[in-house]
Image (cartoon, rainbow, N blue to C red):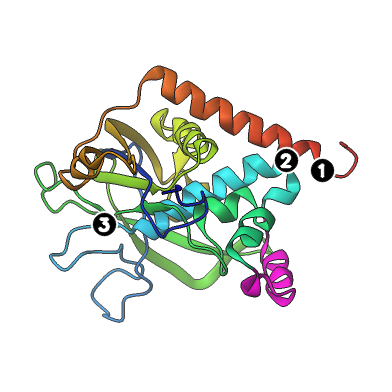
Amino acid sequence: MAAEPIYSFAALRNRLTIRGALLAQTALRIGAGRDSSVIDNDLPVLRDSRGAPLIPGASLKGALRARVETLIRAVAPAEASDLQQIEERMRNGMADKSDAEVWDESTMIDLTFGAPWIAGRIFFKDAMVDRSLWFGQFEVRNGVALNRDTETVDQGKLYDYEVVPAGTRFDFELSIENGDDWQLGMVLLALRPWERGEMQIGGFRSRGLGYVRLEVRERRFVALDPGNPDTLLALLDGAGDPPSDKQIAGWVEAFRAKLREKAAKEPGNA
């Protein structure tokens, strides 16, 4: 039986899983809106049902997507879609095209992170705090709103905001399903700044908040062979092998080749 096309989700062909920890290098703030209680902070952080801070998977995915998009836009601007471009393609009937047409006409960002007409291939878990190292610590800081015209403090615009202190550790897990080689390479490369501690997440980043460092504990890759049921059993058992250096280098090279291909098609580069 022929393998499912690369764009199809009808059969699971491969999965790359990356697990580790996110260490807050500076205080960080994932906001929960405003607090209606007069005795609490004006701007509390997001908490789970047991009162511990967490980082939603959507926030992690959004931070990774935004950074990848800005980098790709510098080389191949057409591969990073803004809201206006997405709406234009929706009006042009993108949702009515065949799977193959959607795959061919979607950008690299669309194909990896998703768009209104195509499912994404990268999935983040909510990053829960490591309770073995967290004992209910929060910090409260003061803020003040400035009048942009007079460059002075607006009367009555003092407020408190809550942050999670530096040193807090969160669990981290993402997976990529049915990823093409270039997508696997793109995501692994995009996580390198996270591993160097160069990424910020959350709010108030201009104040120095939100720097995190990703500590990768394991990478697991499973490729399902239609003729080998052992590969399916390995996936169901949560097994899989760490990708080899040669395998990772091949994925990175596939991403480089894909980016060159897209850049060559930009107006003025042909």
Residue carrying label 1: 266
Q: Earlier in the sequence, mark 3 or mark 2?
A: 3
* Nearer to us in this view, 92 or 167: 92
Spatial CA distance of label 2 from label 1 is 7 Å
Between 183 and 27, which is closer to the camera in this rendering? 183
Picture layout, residue 21 above or below residue 103? above
Q: Position of residue 49 (x, y in %)?
A: 16, 68
Q: CA distance from mark 3 to mark 2?
A: 37 Å
- Residue reaching furthest right? 268
Q: Which mark is residue 54?
A: 3
Which of label 3 and label 2 is nearer to you? 2
Magenta residues, as a range? 81-97
> Are circles 2 and 1 on residues that touch, CB within 8 Å?
yes
Q: How many neighbours does mark 1 have within 10 angstroms: few (below 14), some (14-19), or many (20 or more)?
A: some
Q: Three-letter amino acid code at disc 1?
A: Glu
Q: Nearer the viewer, mark 3 or mark 1?
A: 1
Q: Which residue is mark 2?
A: 262
